[in-house]
Amino acid sequence: LQASESCGIIGIFSSRQCSIDIFYGLRALQHRGQESAGIATFHEDSVHRILGPGLVHNAFTRDQVRNLNGARGIGHVRYPTTGGADPRNIQPLVVSSLAGDVALAHNGDIVNSSDLRNELHGKGWSFLSRSDSEIIVRIIIHEMSRSNGDPVLGIQKAMDRLVGSYALVMLVGDRVFTVRDPHGIKPLCLGQLSPFGLVVASESCALDVLGARFLRDVAPGEVLELTAERAVSHSVRASPNTAHCMFEYVYFSRPDSVLDGRSVYKARTEMGRALAREFPVEADVVVPVPDSGRAHALGFSEVSGIPMREGLIKNRYVHRTFIMGESEKRKRAMSLKLTPNRAVIQGKRVVLLDDSIVRGTTMGQIVQMLRKAGAMEVHVRIGSPPILSPCYYGIDMKTRDQFIAKPNQKREAICAKVAKSINANTVGYVTVEGLVRAIGKSEDDMCLGCLARGYPTSVPKERTRKLRGK
Ligand code: 5GP
Ligand code: MG
């Protein structure tokens, strides 16, 4: 099993101690990973690191963060996986090299990592972990050593070999680099810290917490260095078309973030508006599944004219039902996490809005909950099209047989089957066209791999996407 997931990353170049800013930035990125957190800084000729399991504020003690000196640093939050928290997979990774200590934090998934690993094993290399991030850092250092120790050349040469999604922040000795894969699959943006300093982070919400001014997104394929004067763009190797992950807009990113020029919140409300036009229904009340369905529900309510009410109440102290393995445990956790609000639901025809259905377990339980609370009808509306194909770039939907929707069927057939199995009166998913319009980018510039539209990079045994052109 390979260890790598969608995560959150941050990097800072400043003139004063940066560990506290990194700590708060990571807290703003907490939704991107709850399994573990880590911070690495450069101070007095070497990299120092603190790591811990759990949420950012539990992973370190106050003193650990305060005592971590250095004006340059990087941080990482790791997404929880069913495999559990192997301490070897906690990031940032730190290795020593001829160029000094190198630290790396990675968000994404390298598709050809097993090929690279096998090739390097064959050359006598060995690895400390199963993490594809270790392969990245090893290849970069190897290529650096063959390029007179030049980190920029090392990174560029490594990029020629890596296939997949990667947003990186790195310390190479006292230098801070950030890299985004040529398709821009994962988000990454740059901001100005006041009074002095630069910050890069997975999402703009981390910049807001630090009071940083948003400067721009890191360009797909860009190698950027944060320096005392400015952010130096060493090179940009973009693909002709980008492939921004649609699921960042649907679910993964925070609604107050702006990714590649598009507000996540606005995209979500537009998805809800599209749904109301594509799958209208007569009903009394629109109910969001909190929190992931809120913005979609608002858009649906606006267009349909059906009032939105809080028909489900979320216990904000319960987390992590999505990754729980045993279904009995998941069920219990779900009824702890969400409870129906009878005052809103009883005797009503309900339209239930959520961002996505993956396995269908969550929705099945919620529909049952609403019926028990006296809902007369439950119509499910989903802010993304059916998930049909695995994600190879880091989102936690990895095998075909886990999906409740099956490919090669007409839309109506999928809706009817899913409605039956989750006991809903009707089910409607936003169309791919509706989704793409809501995000406001060209279909050719999005990754829609999980919607069975083909993948932006080569993936063994899978179809690459066909660009439609202008
Ligand atoms: P299902 O029960 O259908 O497998 O999961 C769908 C639900 O999980 C939706 O409510 C959606 O908001 C949430 N979800 C979808 N993808 C992810 C993910 O990658 N991580 C987590 N934690 N939740 C997810
Ligand atoms: Mg949800």
Image (cartoon, rainbow, N blue to C red):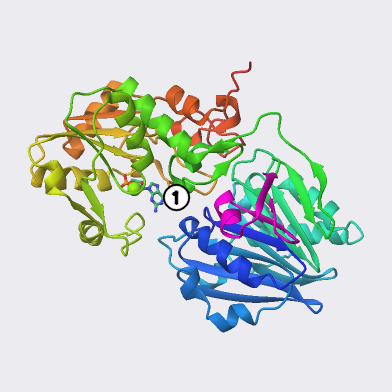
Magenta residues (range)? 191-216
Q: Which residue is mark 1?
A: 396
Q: Position of residue 383 (x, y in %)?
A: 37, 34
Q: Which quarter of the picture shows residue 278?
A: top left
Q: Check mark 1 vs ligand 1: CB closer than 8 Å? yes or no.
A: yes
Image height of 85 relative to 411, above or below = below
Q: Position of residue 156 (x, y in %)?
A: 80, 48
Mark 1 neighbour class, 10 Å CA radius: few under 14, some 14 to 19, many 20 or more: some
Quadrant location of the C terminus in the rendered image: top right
Q: Is residue 467 magenta?
A: no
Q: Observer-nearest residue: 328 or 117?
A: 328
Q: Is residue 198 magenta?
A: yes
Q: Residue at x 56, y 32 (%)?
A: 446
Image height of 315 relative to 380, above or below = below
Instruction: Say how many tags the image has.
Output: 1
The answer to whether residue 115 is visible is no
Tell me: 153 left or right of 387: right
Q: Observer-nearest residue: 225 or 79?
A: 225
Q: Residue at x 59, y 18 (%)?
A: 468
Q: Position of residue 209 (x, y in %)?
A: 56, 58
Residue sitting at the far front: 195
Q: Residue at x 43, y 30 (%)?
A: 270
Residue sitting at the far right: 148
The answer to whether residue 439 is visible is yes
Image height of 62 relative to 212, above or below = below
Q: Residue at x 56, y 57 (%)?
A: 8
Amino acid type shown at disc 1: Asp
Q: Secondary structure at mark 1?
A: loop
Q: Which quarter of the picture shows residue 244?
A: top right
Q: Position of residue 184 (x, y in %)?
A: 64, 40
Q: Observer-nearest residue: 262 or 3?
A: 262
